[in-house]
Image (cartoon, coloured by chain):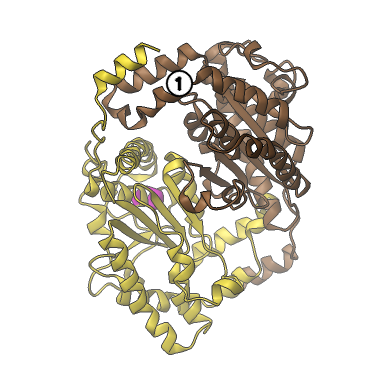
Chain colours: A yellow, B brown
Amino acid sequence: MTAKSQHYWGADALDILRVGEGFVLSGVDPESAPGHPGGKVQGQADLATGLEQLDEYQERLFAQSRADATHASVLLVLQAMDSAGKGGIVRHVVGAVDPQGVMLTAFKKPTSQELAHDFLWRIRKRVPTPGMIGVFDRSHYEDVLIGKVRSLAPADEIERRYDAINAFEKELTDAGTRVVKVMLHISYDEQRTRLMERLDRPDKHWKYNPGDVDEREMWPHYMDAYQTVFERTSTEHAPWYVVPANRKWYARLAVQTLLLETLEGIDPQWPAATFDVETEKKRLAAT
Amino acid sequence: MTAKSQHYWGADALDILRVGEGFVLSGVDPESAPGHPGGKVQGQADLATGLEQLDEYQERLFAQSRADATHASVLLVLQAMDSAGKGGIVRHVVGAVDPQGVMLTAFKKPTSQELAHDFLWRIRKRVPTPGMIGVFDRSHYEDVLIGKVRSLAPADEIERRYDAINAFEKELTDAGTRVVKVMLHISYDEQRTRLMERLDRPDKHWKYNPGDVDEREMWPHYMDAYQTVFERTSTEHAPWYVVPANRKWYARLAVQTLLLETLEGIDPQWPAATFDVETEKKRLAAT
């Protein structure tokens, strides 16, 4: 298989979108489409092509793990401000592969039971098993984002968490999980437009919560908290990727490409038969 | 919304396919397409139409549950002999709706921990929460199918399980879960063809297991065990549906229609806003 990225992107999305040294979030234009100059129509066509490739990669990875031939798995971590499009990624990118190969978890406000444990307790229970694509819709990063902005934990505990996260993610990658951490980056104005649309449409009211505006009022604090997250946790083993997300087609294509390139790195193969094929054909034919 | 079933089926699939009194499994032709005389091309077009409806029903149900406006959920139980097409149902019917609204569990051979508990222990942990569509790929019925055919438990324990299952499913339906139990019914010859295809294609070898032929050799015993399951557990509150499955397009369409009609019965509505829309518009516009 040849990865999509080699056809449509000037370079690997894993390089273009990666948060490296000296990265400054405010320097990223949420309207931009780095790596994909083709525009919306081309982008949507590319998305459709990529879905087929993602589908095959996922099945190969799953097949290999069933034959005990790999420990590899993928964990896609999605973080973003409200309405940035996490749900659309889950639906249109992740939703295109076989549900049998996906472990999706939407992390909500922690329950009292969860709060009684370390912040990684509920996270650990949902890491993908071999062969699976795990998806976190929000994640342990909430504990250093809203956790910090809203002072839900003492400053020294927040401080401790960055290192705990790095150690945790190192464990994961050492065990064979590719961790792909994505922040979908929309602009302050775009968020107003999207939230207003939810208010305008009765079939979208359920997605709106008055608390969304409260969080929106803390926007600069959130951007600062994200900047710190990037500085403290965009590691060699588990880097962050910031995806400009004002254009939905671009954000979906970019995340799909990050997944495709990650799977390409694993390069899963159909496992060899663990039985003698000719013998089995004879046994079966005799029935 | 108008359900698909009213357009394409002569009567409700929930009636046509239901296992009622006097049902005899051997009287069902796996090649047949009851309720849908249109053939494959029409069937595939209907499947595409139905997917959009299923998608909207699922989102409404999910939305309503988020607003605490319903306890309803759906549980699709899939049982079948190997290669009958459970995976295809999960992928092409269930896989077409938003993954955020689906709880899928593939029950494998029980672990030693699971065996140390009652057979329903692992099942209870995976029943759908309100608003969700739960899917069991295999289920507690394995414990009275392979459990019986292979004598994995004493006869009186198997006997006890039918009643335990009925009581358990009554609990579920009393709590608001619609339980849709489907057996995909293929013929003995069709299974040979499908298993042979797995042996013919290296990219399908991983789906084949020599044990599949061992189970196949017990075919008549399995058919008897299914017949008993239907007699003992096709109840008023949680009836069985037998879906002829030699034609994949038909099986998928039939299961989709069973789900559509079930959701139609729930009739989920977009929940009313729990906030004052005009006030929120003003608050948002001021940011």
Where does residue A134 sit, x and y in percent of width and height? 41, 53
Which of these two is toward me, B123 or B280?
A: B123
Q: Quadrant of the C terminus of chain A?
A: top left
Which of these two is toward me, B247 or B200?
A: B200
* Image quarter of residue B78: top right
Dot 1 lies on which element? helix
Disc 1 packing (10 Å; few <14; some 14–19; many ≥20): some
Query: What's under tag 1, amino acid-wise?
Result: Arg
* Image quarter of residue A161: bottom left
- Is there any visible trace of residue B248 in the rendered image? yes
Residue at 50%, 84% (x, y): give it.
A153
- Membership of A251 in magenta stretch: yes
Q: Is residue A185 left or right of residue A280?
A: right
- A136 up-or-down from B7: above or below: below
Q: Main secondary structure of the magenta part?
A: helix
Region rendered in magenta = A250-254
- A140 up-or-down from A163: above or below: above
